[in-house]
Every structure is written in C-alpha cells, then in structure tokens.
Image (cartoon, rainbow, N blue to C red):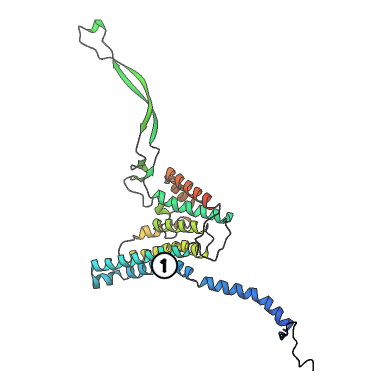
Amino acid sequence: LSSLIPHTNNHGRTKREAPPSSPSSHTHTQQQQPHTIMATSLAHHLTTTPLQWALGGWTFFLLENVLLSENRTYLLSRLGDDTYHAIYGTCSTLAMGSVAYGYRRVRGAPPLLLGAVPTVGGKMVSLVCLSLGLGIISQMTPKLQIPVEYYGSVGKTTTPTPPPEEHVTNGPMESSETNDTVSRGWKVRCPFDFTDKKQQPHDGHVPPLYGVERISRHPGLWSLAFLGLGNAMLVPSLPQRVWLSMPVLVAFIGGAHTDSRYRRGMGGELPKEYDDMTSNVPFWAMITGRQGNVLEVFKDAVEEVKPLNAALAVGAAGMFVWRRGRGGMKMPVR
C-alpha cells in the first residue's frame, strides 16, 4: 500500500520523483555535448552574415569585372560605347560600395582566431607582406632624393700676365698662369629626381624590363594584395581576415583574365616577347629563368631599386607592425 500512496512533504504537498536515468545515457550526454556545441558553433560562424559579407563583396567585384570585360566586344556592338561604360562604371561603383560596407560588417566579428597579441610568426609574415606592398608602390613613384646636397669641386683658372718690357716693341706676347681652385658649399635640389639615369636608353634602346616590371605584369594589383595580406595577419577576427585576404584572389584571377584578353587583342595588347619574359604571379618569371640567369636577374633588380623610396617603405611597414602587433586592438561593440 505504501507504494500506491504518494509521498508528501512537510507542507502536505505531493512530492513527485523524477524517473531515474541510466548511467550510460548520462555519461554519453556528458561526452557528446561539448563536441556537439563546438560543431554547431563552427557551422554557425561559417554560415553567419559577417563571413558572407567578407566573401560576397569581393566576389561581386571580381565577377562583374570579368563578365563585363570578357564580353566587351559584344556589349559595345549592341549597346554602344557610352552605354557600355555607363553600365560598367555603375556596376563597379556598386561592387566597391558592397566591399566597403562588407568591411564595416566584418570588422572585429567572431570567431576570433588569435588572442589580443598576434603571434611572432604572424608579425614576421605581416612585415614581409607589408614591405613588399609598400615597396612596390614606392618603386612606381619618382625617385626620392635628399633635398639638400653638399658639393665640392676642383677647377682650374687662368690668369693673364703682362709681357716683358723687351717684347713691347715687337707686340704683346700672350702669357697666362693656371691655378687650381676649390669650391665647396650646399645646394638645394628637388626632392624628386625626374631625370633618373637608370631609366635612360642604353646603347640606343630602352631595356625591355625595368624595376617592378620584373616582378609582375600587374604591380598595382599585387601591391594591394600584399597590403591586405599583411594586415590580415595582425587581426584576430576570421571574417575580417578573410576580407583582407580577398585582394590576393582578385589580383590572381583579375590579372590572369587581363592577360588573356590582351593576348586576344581585347582592350589592349600583350607582345609575345614581353609575355614570355614576365609573369602575373610576383617573382615567378625571375625564379624560373624567363629573364635569364637567376642570380644576374636579381642582381640587376637590386641595382634598379630606388633606395630611399624602398627604405621609407620598409620603415613604414615596420612601424605599422610594431604598433599593431602590440595588441590591445579595440573591437566594435555589437
């Protein structure tokens, strides 16, 4: 009978007991729950809106450029030059707008891959990438030089001397005295050297390759790619890192597609000799021997570097990594 009568507590309320659970079921739940939560969290972050914005804006920009430029001839014949460029400009503006808005959505968004301070390896990769990006840009500008210069030169002056008295009746005799003179001082010059002698013709012809052209056929695209990749190594946010790394894909696909169009005479030209000696991927033509002996090629490339431009670029990259690499980055409140 006691088993049929419900138990009551001190206040007269019925006390119900929960059905017992099996030990194996309880143990299984404890073992599976952390893994299930982790997998669910990872799947959520991979399909979350910030990561979609990180990929979507750049993908839209890349696709609209490839599709419109690939069908350039057909669209020009059907729409006309003005309408085609109006559509192209509108689509490019919308694409870049989505890229900019995407960065606002991904900045500091979870999941976070690193702690507050980037790793040493990340800092080193960032320094190399930023130095390459800023270095390529610096070599595309006029050569920098110190605006003041100290000069010293040795010259010769000729002083005429009067003829002796015994030669006066026979006419003046030319006589002179030569002395060495030394001139020293400071002079002001333009901080930009627009007459860089390295860019002048050699033996009556301009060298086929010079400067950043040795590195890549598309130095502008790859400088942006290196800058983005260098910044990506210093941020802990996965969506933000993806957004900053996407210019690498844009440079690779966009540069290859431009080369393909130019080889077919669409929108430009790519001479075969220049095509054979250069590459889209940075340094690939140099290390594969397309430009000649690898050591000689790198030696020539170093001699063609604008030293003050490169020094400022590397210094700026180092300062940026030093400041951002200390951590303490403020994340936006969401």
Query: Where is residue 169 shown, x and y percent of the image?
Result: 20, 6
* Residue sitting nearer the eye, 299 or 239: 239
- Which residue sits at x=62%, y=76%? 36
Label 1: element kind: helix
Q: Residue at x 57, y 72 (%)?
A: 41
Quadrant position of the N terminus in the picture? bottom right
Outermost top residue = 166
Furthest toward the right, the residue is 1
Q: Amino acid at mark 1?
A: Gly
In this view, 51 is above or below 169: below
Q: Position of residue 240 (x, y in %)?
A: 49, 63
Nearer to the camera, 64 or 259: 64
Query: Is residue 154 in sight in this rendering?
Result: yes
| Residue 251 versus residue 2 in the image, above or below | above
Q: Residue at x 64, y 73 (%)?
A: 34
The percent position of residue 63, horizontal first and vertical second, equals 38, 69
Residue 265 appearing in the image? no
Task: Find residue 131 and report its horizontal and vertical position in percent.
Answer: 48, 51
Q: Give 169 or 283, whichever is nearer the viewer.
A: 283
Q: Quadrant of residue 157?
A: top left
Badge 1: residue crowd in 10 Å (few <14, some 14–19, many ≥20): many
User: Residue 42 appears in which quarter of the rendering?
Assistant: bottom right
* Picture quadrant of residue 58: bottom left
Name the side, left or right, on which 28 lies relative to 172. Answer: right
Residue, disc 1: 57
For the residue pair 96 and 249, the one nearer the viewer reads as: 96
